[in-house]
Image (cartoon, rainbow, N blue to C red):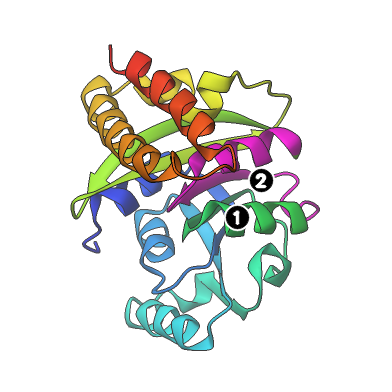
Amino acid sequence: MLTLDERLRALVEMVPVCREFADIGCDHGRLGAQLLLSGRVQRVQFTDISAPSMEKARELIRKLELSDRAVFRVGDGARALAEKPDAAVIAGMGASTISKIISEGADILSDAEIFLQPNLDEAELRECLEKNGYAITQERVVRAAGRWYVLIAARRGEMHLSETERIAGTASMREDRQAYEGYAQFRLRVAKKALEGARAATDGRAEELQRAIEIWEEAVK
């Protein structure tokens, strides 16, 4: 078995048993490799916009003698996939990039359960999912290497998020109360610090941040 950090281990745990899996923006390929080793997925399509990153993933899979269960394609997002997956991970990118991949890959991802890990702006990603006809099925908070990460599972379906759910996450995110409270306190500190700089501007950002602070303060009560 490979050594994975808490973020990647949590993603592996969330992925269901399936035949065809896609690791979109695979980088080193460790997540897809672990899913193959575990037997949870039968085949992985590894995609990345970077040829050097793809070569790292290819070399790892070759060393693990898993090449007969892997496909490698250099390309942009889900459009690089050769076959519709049953499940797909899009992790380690900003919310805007993940949102673009979801929107542009709507056809090939139509039947897949998707697992997302944005580095920033989770609220933007939740809004994108709602607008693109996805419903969130699970959210988790994990901490790895001193950073907080939000993991989101979603599949096709109707969803109507409240303002609080869009900013502070859906109910499943609170199942690990200790982790959620740590994450919420972090977001509260970040929002308060940002508010100090935004008060001098006139772009409405201060009002937006003040509302976010109120929501996060309520979340940690």
- Give SS at disc 1: helix
Q: In the depicted view, which residue is nearer to us: 205 or 201?
A: 201
Position in image of residue 39 (x %, y %)? 41, 54
Position in image of residue 45 (x %, y %)? 58, 67
Amino acid type at image mark 2:
Ala
Taking 41 as reference, is 194 left or right?
left
- Residue at x-position 33% and y-position 53%: 8
- Residue at x-position 38% and y-position 34%: 140
Q: Is residue 172 above or below residue 150?
A: above
- Residue at x-position 40% and y-position 77%: 61
- Give SS at disc 2: loop
Position in image of residue 106 (x %, y %)? 77, 51
Q: In the depicted view, which residue is nearer to us: 67 or 119?
A: 119
Q: Which residues are magenta?
A: 106-131
Taking 185 as reference, is 34 left or right?
right
Q: Is residue 42 above or below residue 13?
A: below
**In this view, the mark in front (1 or 2):** 1
Amino acid type at image mark 1:
Ser
Position in image of residue 63 (x %, y %)? 33, 82
Q: Is residue 162 magenta?
A: no
Residue carrying label 2: 112
Q: Quadrant of the N terminus?
A: bottom left
Residue carrying label 1: 96
Q: Are marks 1 and 2 in contact (CB under 8 Å)?
A: no
Disc 1 and disc 2: Cα gap in Å? 20 Å
- Residue at x-position 69% and y-position 68%: 81
Tell me the crowding category of disc 2: few under 14, some 14 to 19, or many 20 or more residues within 10 angstroms, Cα based.
many
Q: Is residue 221 visible?
A: yes
Q: Is residue 150 above or below residue 38?
A: above
Which of disc 2 and disc 1 is earlier in sequence?
A: 1
